[in-house]
Image (spheres, rainbow, N blue to C red):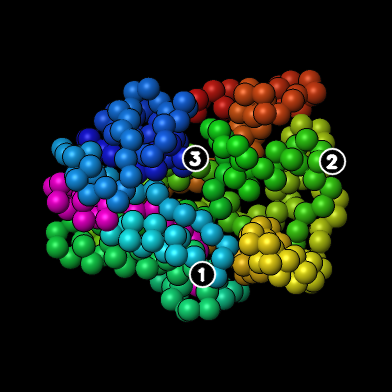
């Protein structure tokens, strides 16, 4: 099967490229910037998704396109985020339809589900969506992008939407690393004495990539699938990471009340300076405060999707970081404990 991936040189994209190639599929990797870590078996093309003629040419002969391009923002309003996450989805869907692509697998986000309405409940694919104007632009734009895809799908393009939860794991060449991986590695370095209250549903990036392939092969047209893993508190995940290399990990958990007090100071100051408040923004704190368990049984039942244990992913992430000089080994823990951890990493390399 000939496939194409928009945003192929990002974190999830590079893992998806490898998953598709290993499964025997042809891959056209589309992105604005080439990554030196892109699997050489893929065919790379520089592309802006808003270049209609270029997109149609790139998708010529493609059977399935995976759309990964998105802009993440913690702002309440941001025109660029809305443009990429809504109009960008529409542009790719229109281009795919015009090029004769059979199916589009769209990578949305768990943020597409209203974090406030779903607080205290297990989220499945029927949960309330992010339509309230009071929600951050990223959440609203991810759901609005899905709606644009479904409008195009009414004219003949097959569409499947997938929602990864908190993605982490190996084959991460980002600098800096995404937030979750960065926390796990800092904990392994012994540099994270404090962690915030709350947790996330964590899912291995390789399981997400496999889930996207399964959605392309077995997903029902017009359906949506949550790709989750295990709900884990952030302090326990970081302590688990630290233990794997003989470190102690975070010893103090900051209560949400304290974090909100800090955010009340940091947020306005960041806005005054024209910057985002990052981990101490009201949006970031609300996300972790309202985060809860995810039911991905639909993907398991209909696609055959499976998620590996959190500890296995952590072991492979730390082994990857040691192998690539991101994390220094002290000669204990991961590399020399006889647990077969390096072998686990090499199976997925």
User: How many residues crowd around disc 3 within 10 Å: few (fewer than 14), some, or many (20 or more)?
Assistant: many
> Label 1 belongs to which residue?
77
Q: Nearer the viewer, mark 3 or mark 1?
A: 1
Left or right position of 164 against 238: left
Q: Quadrant of residue 53?
A: top left
Q: Nearer the viewer, residue 336 or 322?
A: 322
Which residue is drawn at the image coordinates 47% and 54% (left, top)? 71
> Label 2 belongs to which residue?
248
User: How many residues crowd around disc 2 within 10 Å: few (fewer than 14), some, or many (20 or more)?
Assistant: many
Residue 11, which numbered label?
Answer: 3
Q: Secondary structure at mark 3?
A: helix
Cβ–Cβ under 8 Å for marks 3 and 2? no
Q: Earlier in the sequence, mark 3 or mark 2?
A: 3
Residue 24 visible at all: yes
Residue 302 on the magenta span? no
Left or right position of 29 against 124: left
Which residue is drawn at the image coordinates 81% and 61% (left, top)? 254
Q: Quadrant of residue 119?
A: bottom right
Q: CA distance from mark 3 to mark 2?
A: 28 Å
Query: Residue 166: image x %, image y %?
Result: 56, 53
Q: CA distance from mark 1 to mark 2?
A: 40 Å
Which corner quadrant holds the N terminus?
A: top left
User: How many residues crowd around disc 1 within 10 Å: few (fewer than 14), some, or many (20 or more)?
Assistant: some
Q: Earlier in the sequence, mark 3 or mark 1?
A: 3
Left or right position of 327 against 97: right
Which residue is drawn at the image coordinates 63% and 48% (left, top)? 179
In the rendered view, tell whether residue 278 sits above or below residue 76.
Answer: above
In the rendered view, tell whether residue 4 sits above or below residue 343.
Answer: below
Query: Residue 67: image x %, image y %?
Result: 34, 49
Which residues fall within the magenta stretch? 91-114
């Amino acid at each position: 099967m000939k496939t194409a991936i928009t945003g192929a040189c990002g974190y999830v994209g590079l893992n998806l490229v490898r998953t598709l190639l290993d499964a025997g599929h042809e891959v056209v990797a589309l992105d604005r910037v080439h990554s030196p870590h892109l699997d050489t078996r893929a065919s790379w093309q520089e592309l802006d998704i808003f270049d209609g003629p270029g997109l149609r040419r790139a998708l010529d002969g493609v059977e399935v396109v995976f759309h990964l391009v998105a802009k993440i923002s913690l702002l309440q309003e941001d025109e660029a985020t809305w443009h990429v996450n809504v109009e960008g989805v529409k542009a790719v869907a229109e281009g795919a339809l015009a090029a004769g692509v059979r199916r589009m697998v769209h990578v949305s986000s768990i943020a597409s589900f209203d974090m406030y309405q779903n607080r205290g409940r297990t989220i499945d694919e029927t949960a309330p969506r992010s339509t309230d104007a009071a929600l951050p632009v990223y959440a609203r734009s991810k759901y609005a992008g899905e709606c644009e895809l479904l409008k195009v799908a009414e004219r003949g393009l097959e569409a499947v939407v997938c929602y990864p939860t908190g993605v982490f794991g190996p084959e991460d060449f980002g600098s800096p690393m995404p937030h979750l991986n960065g926390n796990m590695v800092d904990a392994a370095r012994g540099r994270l004495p404090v962690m915030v209250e709350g947790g996330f549903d964590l899912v291995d990036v390789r399981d997400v990539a496999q889930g996207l392939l399964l959605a392309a092969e077995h997903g029902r047209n017009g359906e949506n699938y949550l790709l989750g893993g295990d709900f884990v508190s952030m302090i326990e995940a970081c302590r688990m990471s630290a233990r794997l290399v003989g470190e102690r990990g975070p010893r103090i958990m900051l209560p949400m009340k304290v974090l909100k007090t800090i955010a009340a100071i940091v947020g306005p100051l960041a806005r005054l300076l024209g910057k985002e408040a990052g981990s101490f923004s009201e949006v970031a704190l609300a996300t972790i405060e309202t985060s809860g368990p995810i039911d991905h049984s639909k993907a398991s039942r209909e696609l055959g999707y499976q998620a590996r244990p959190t500890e296995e992913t952590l072991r492979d992430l730390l082994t990857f970081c040691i192998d690539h000089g991101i994390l220094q080994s002290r000669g204990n823990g991961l590399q020399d404990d006889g647990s077969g951890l390096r072998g686990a990493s090499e199976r997925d390399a």
